[in-house]
Image (cartoon, rainbow, N blue to C red):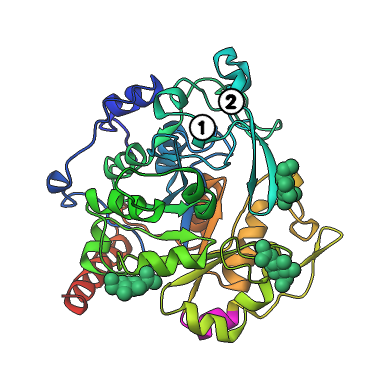
Amino acid sequence: MTSTCFAPFLFLSLIAGCAARPIYPLPSKTSNENRQPIQTSRPYNIAHRGSNGEIPEETAAAYMRAIKEGADFIETDILSSKDGVLICFHDVTLDETTDVTKHKEFANRKRTYEVQGVNTTGFFTVDFTLEELKKLRVKQRYVFRDQQYNGKFPIITFEEFISIALDAPRVVGIYPEIKNPVFINQRVKWPDGKRFEDKFVETLKKYGYRGSYMSKDWFKQPLFIQSFAPTSLVYISNLTDSPKIFLIDDVTIPTQDTNQSYWEITSDDYLDFIKEYVVGIGPWKDTVVPIKDNYLQTPTDLVARAHAHNLQVHPYTYRDENVFLHFDFHQDPYQEYDYWLNKIGVDGLFTDFTGSLHKFQEWTSPLSQNDGSDKGRASKLLDKIELLIASYKNG
Ligand SMILES: *[C@@H]1O[C@H](CO)[C@@H](O)[C@H](O)[C@H]1NC(C)=O
Ligand SMILES: *[C@@H]1O[C@H](CO)[C@@H](O)[C@H](O)[C@H]1NC(C)=O
Ligand SMILES: *[C@@H]1O[C@H](CO)[C@@H](O)[C@H](O)[C@H]1NC(C)=O
């Protein structure tokens, strides 16, 4: 893929942390005519926080790398600034992945708040205005990853994130999470009395994201909305028909809003309930296949039961490094992908290394869209037919 037309202005403005001047195409000006459509013939490559295995998470550079490396979707976590601007950031505190502690002017901002039943101390995004957040620079979460980009890139807003996807040279989907909605709604008040979830959906609609899974509108701007909080998903299903994914945490962690156990929310009864609102679930992979002494145990029946409810399964998080790979995979991330794609049979994967997953899929189930061969033409034709059928079905 060539990157020459790849929005150098946007890139520079995001690197420089220029908050006031987001450059993005107007939704009405976005055209998919010459852009390669999103593939739907194999499990989705979901770039978890961008290519954060290589570049600090949730930065413009991490997302652009992921797009270059073949992501179907770029994934992000949405939180809020003090002044109610939605930002892409994973933790409720800035401590782990920014240089906030180096900023003397913010030394008095440290707070302790209860977050999901745990007293947490640190510098919270909700105590900084967007302008202040833009003064910070992001750094790698893990010491064993490349540190050379630390201090180079600012936090980006939800709108800037969307503009990166819309500017991509092919159709790239977005996969934003409504992060810690209980906490955000407690701490941030929007002047118009709206909730975090309202602001989240408003932003998506402003940029033209709409339409049910595989509808014509969805193919133009593919989107999955994700949340660990069932009440948020039920609430926003009133606001948009865009597809939603219900995230499921570790077996020991109750839901943050409804205080339901893992066992309750993975029961057949609950899947029956939630399938009215979501198209799939996003479980932590080690709950789908439990681990003992770093070896895989017998897989649970969660994937089979979810599929029986017509729910997709997108587990998280796949990481190349030895420290994350279970011994069964012989320190080989391709063996892990092979196991999950071909043995467990999932519908998408959240990966820190989009490039690795993409190469594995290209080698084992190539799309061959740009090779000019008969196979390539056939797959293009199939994509066209798929689009046609989808638009016919969904009006
Ligand atoms: C958090 O700290 C406050 C103040 O010390 C205390 O009242 C509260 O019970 C603590 N909450 C938890 C969950 O420990
Ligand atoms: C959905 O909207 C309807 C009509 O506005 C309202 O009565 C209902 O309570 C809403 N449901 C949820 C879950 O917010
Ligand atoms: C959540 O549920 C557990 C188990 O039923 C209960 O012990 C706990 O008090 C509940 N927590 C809250 C905040 O309701």
Secondary structure of the residue carrying tag 2 is helix
Q: Residues within 10 Å of mark 1 (few under 14, many from 20)?
A: some
- The question of residue 196 being in magenta is answered with no
- Tell me which residue sits at (55%, 48%) in the image: 356
Q: Which percent across, then down, holds residue 196?
A: 40, 51
The residue singled out by tag 1 in the image is 127
Instruction: Report the front residue among 367 and 262.
Output: 262
Instruction: Report the front residue among 353 and 307.
Output: 307
- Tell me which residue sits at (32%, 23%) in the image: 13
Q: Which percent across, then down, holds residue 144?
A: 71, 32
Q: Which percent across, then down, holds residue 367?
A: 38, 60
What amino acid type is highlighted by mark number 1? Asp
**Which image quadrant for residue 110?**
top right
Number of the label disc, if any, that sits on residue 109: 2
Name of the residue lying farthest toward the top: 104
- Tell me which residue sits at (58%, 85%) in the image: 268
CB under 8 Å between discs 2 and 1: yes
Q: Give the range drawn in magenta.
A: 304-310
Q: Residues within 10 Å of mark 2 (few under 14, many from 20)?
A: few
**Which image quadrant for residue 240?**
bottom left
Residue 324 seen in render: no
- Tell me which residue sits at (41%, 79%) in the image: 276
Q: Which percent across, then down, holds residue 26?
A: 16, 42
320 to the left or right of 233 = right
Query: In which quadrant will I find the N terminus?
Result: top left
